[in-house]
Image (spheres, rainbow, N blue to C red):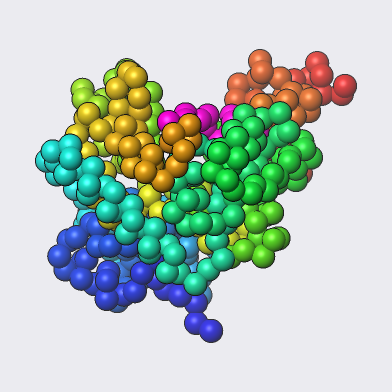
Amino acid sequence: MTAPRLRGTEPPVVRTALENRDPLPGTTGFAGAVDDRLVRDVLGRVPLFVDGASSTTRAEPTWAFEPTALEEPTLFPAGAAAAVGESLPDPESHWALPDPTPAAPDAALAGLADAIETAADAARRDDRDIAVAFSGGVDSALVAELLDAPLYVVGFPDSHDVEAARTAADAMGRDLTVVDLEPADLERAVPDVARATGRTNAMDVQIALPLFLVGERVAADGFDALAVGQGADELFGGYEKVVRLDHRVEAETVRGAVREGIRSLPAQLPRDVLTIRATGLEPVAPFLHDAVVAAALRLPDELLADEDERKRGFRRIAAEYLPAEVATRDKKAVQYGSLVARELDRLARQAGYKRRIDDHVTKYVAALCSDGPTERDSSSASS
């Protein structure tokens, strides 16, 4: 069987999007080669890599969907199109993220509700057995309700995510599978995550580990795909920084800060997509459908976030599907809510990578991925 040259949609869709310069043509992202041109959608929802090696030959691949297939993998820019073999184009060289005028609140809310239904319908139409990575927060809870799919939570036994998932599942009247972690699970999985994503920095590995470990269990239970609530925080104003407008953002308005968050997705999504695929599953992210992205870009400040509530418009829609206690719930980031970050830090220190060492967890990750020596605290390396 010939390997696919395009992922995420069919070539005619991309050809039309190229011709019309339409950045949101109704897909959940795409990347690959069409008519000898490399393309990647405006949010980078499908990873695509080109080889940065200076001495490639025609016998070697010049691009791939996974970094492991190339000698020096470099992410192809989101929103770009270029002839195969050309130097990397500038980001958004063909498609740019739209910047529409915000809609009136009622119209914006109705448009978002319709878009979320469109995305859910598209996910349900795919002939796949789907499970949901469920943390008990509003994002994954709405995905679970829309797709009516089984719920899986991953975390250490005393973690926030496991408790939150249990109480949310009870409120929703749903069964829940708990994937309990042990420290050995992290040690075993770190090299696989690093290999699949091409990333070894502590933060990326900490975020990817829960996805990988829950994906392993979901795949073992016979499912084809893992649904996630990714994108909701970026699209709908889920971060504290968009309200504070502090040093972490350049924008002077909530809406501008949310837009900055959306533009950060191309750097994040390859990690998560590659992690899920490394377990043999396909990722399903309904909130990253083009229709939802387009609707989110039209939300006014008052439907995004303020000091009292974040993701305000999104929560109003979620409340139509979920119990109030779930629709209004906040959650911790997965690496903290699952306690993976805490336990990986503990393992690093037990291995001699003390906190006094600069970026000690990253150095520990590198050690797990390599047979060679790395910098440790000499005072405890032999203990």
Residue 349 in percent (x, y) is at 74, 23
Residue 195 in percent (x, y) is at 62, 51
30 vs 361, nearest the viewer = 30
Residue 173 in percent (x, y) is at 58, 46
Magenta region, main secondary structure: loop
Residue located at (78% from left, 19% from top): 378
In the displayed structure, would residue 223 be above or below residue 198? below
340 vs 363, nearest the viewer = 340
Q: Which residues are magenta?
A: 328-340
Residue 81 in percent (x, y) is at 27, 61
Q: Is residue 353 left or right of residue 63?
A: right
225 vs 317, nearest the viewer = 317
Q: Is residue 353 left or right of residue 145?
A: right
Residue located at (30% from left, 27% from top): 305
Q: Residue lying furthest bottom in this view?
A: 1
User: Could you tell me if residue 132 is visible in this image?
Assistant: yes
